[in-house]
Amino acid sequence: MSQNESLVAADDADNVVHGYLGTTPPIGQLPARGERFWVEHPEKLLNAVNILKKARVVAVDAEFTQVRTRVQTPEKSVSMVPRLSLLQLAIDQTCFVVDALRLHNLAPLAEVLSNPQIAVLLHGAGGDLRVMAERGLQVVRYYDLEATCRSIFGQRESSLAAMLQRAFAFSLDKTLQRTDWTRRPLPPAMIAYAARDAEVTLALYYWLDHHYHTILQAYQVCEQTPEVVPVWIEPFLKGNSPLSPEIAVAEARKCGLIQNRSQVFVDCRTALSQVLHPMRRGRLLRLIADLGLTQLVPDILPLLGAPTADERAGSARALGRLGVDSAIEAIMPLLQDPVQDVRKAAQIAIRNLTEKETPKQRAVPVKNVDGSRRWVIDHEQNGSIPIKDDDSWQSRLRSIMDV
């Protein structure tokens, strides 16, 4: 595709072909079903732990139910809280289905889940990690296979059912997914259904490790060896910062974590070299774009060719938002990327860089004399607000820091 054809394609909002367009490794063979054990008594749990702690990897899946609880507020509102019902743990040829309702003390499982020598395998880690944490179980080393698959094949292709179809030509029955997991006794069919999800997660891990070892390793999380980044950046990497980037910088300056404007650039550049997890790096790229750090463009450009879709899409979005016209040629090949998410990100980035309309004005927080804050529209383009130079992120920080 020529450059002109690429630009026309990027200008067409509906031209992104759906789905994964790359090649897929040969279909694998699911292992034969192993033994399954129902664990509802403390002694059975201890026996299970003695077996599980000898494994190198343990696939874990959780079944939980949303329980209605009344919140003690003046309005006496009702909220839905997830309640762990089952915890399935699978190793080669063996799966334990733990009754988390009858077993009030799950602490023995910490010997497995909190052991950094054992890799815990999850597919869609967020919900499972939360409900386990509520029962006092902290996972210190894990792989989120859903995130790994999403970065190889795309968002639409990363569900467990879709991946089992791709990897093993196996159709996963999810008819019992929304069933009531609090009922007791639990029918054998439901126990088998629960065990199977953990078993196929283990099989998928082996398939991914064989064909996509490098990408799989990039998505490993080890809480005992976290990536070291400046304190003020960490909330953005976790995706839970309550502050906008500009306010976060101002607060860090007030606390002495940032000494001057140059340190913002240095901190972000250091973090970009230290953060290796693709999802966290993608969030860092968004922060860099929000702060308008065009000085980091040379560091971002190589990520357009990264092995993971999270990095390729994140770098394209960042370059588009930074307004780096010279990056169009480097972004254009991503219009043919195998992953739909990357193709869409490249399309939007190129459109942002080629459109002639004035960008949307951004509300900028300004501190008043009395300490309160007001938000004004940044009119740097028409000169309504005097600025000292053309670097928009610096002018925004000056308005916040009273510089």
Image (tube, rainbow, N blue to C red):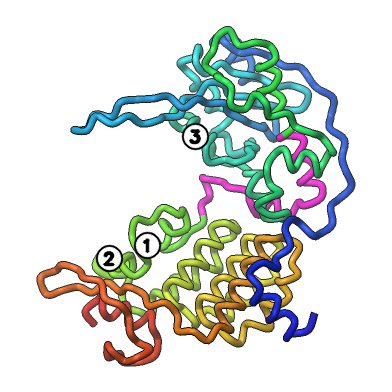
From the viewer's perspective, tell me whether residue 338 is left or right of residue 393: right
Say what amino acid the circle numbered 1 marks: Trp
Residue 340 at what x, y percent from top left? 70, 60
Q: How many marks?
A: 3
Locate the C terminus by quadrant. Answer: bottom left
Say what amino acid the circle numbered 3 marks: Gln
Give SS at disc 3: loop
Quadrant of residue 298 within the rendered picture: bottom right
Q: Which residues are magenta?
A: 201-226
Mark 1 and mark 3 lie on one chain; the one further toward the N terminus is: 3
Q: Which residue, given by chain and number where applicable, does mark 2 sit on?
A: 251
Give SS at disc 1: loop
Q: Which mark is residue 138?
A: 3
Q: Which residue, given by chain and number where applicable, does mark 1 sit on?
A: 232
Q: Residue at x 39, y 90 (%)?
A: 390
CA gap, disc 1 and disc 2: 9 Å
One can see residue 198 in this view = no
> Are the residues tagged 1 and 2 within 8 Å (C-beta)?
yes
Q: Residue at x 60, y 11 (%)?
A: 186
